[in-house]
Amino acid sequence: MARAYRTFPTKAEEKMQAPLGELGFEAQVLLCGYIADFANSQHMIIVEIDGPIHDKKKVYDMYRDAVLAKDGWKVWRFKNEEVFASPQALADRIWKMILN
């Protein structure tokens, strides 16, 4: 399934692939039984790009994030709108968050 998601990313995910790839993130990684939009195993960080559907999935997302956190992952969520405003600015912000 992860392979299918890599083949057909959302528009927001597609815009973030290159900038996050430069920061060592892989797209559509299977972790703890869930597919992470982007994961950096060196820093144990997952970046999720959330579209409108996530407004209806808050409880599920909280549970999923808790499962991933138990395995040592930090999950950072960003809205599609942040990506569309400026993918590079968001990648720069993520890099600064990693450094802190």
Image: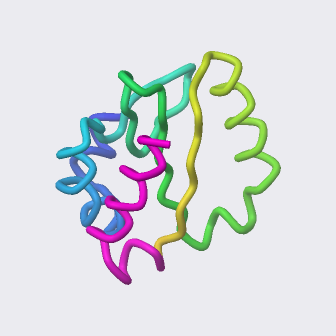
Q: In the figure, is residue 3 to the left or right of 18?
A: right
Q: Which residue is painted at 74% across and 31% down in the image?
A: 66
On the image, the x and y values in percent for residue 56 come to 75, 65
Q: Position of residue 11 (x, y in %)?
A: 31, 69
Magenta includes 97?
Answer: yes
65 left or right of 45 in image: right
Q: How many marks?
A: 0
Give the farthest residue toward the front. 100
Nearest to the observer: residue 41 or residue 96: 96
- Quadrant position of residue 30: top left
Q: What kind of colouring is applied to the model shown? A: rainbow
Highlighted range, magenta: 81-100
Q: Main secondary structure of the magenta part?
A: helix
Please state which of residues 26 and 54 is positioned toward the viewer in this rendering.
Answer: 26
Q: Does the magenta portion include 63?
A: no
Relative vertical location of residue 82 with respect to residue 98 in this rendering, above or below? below
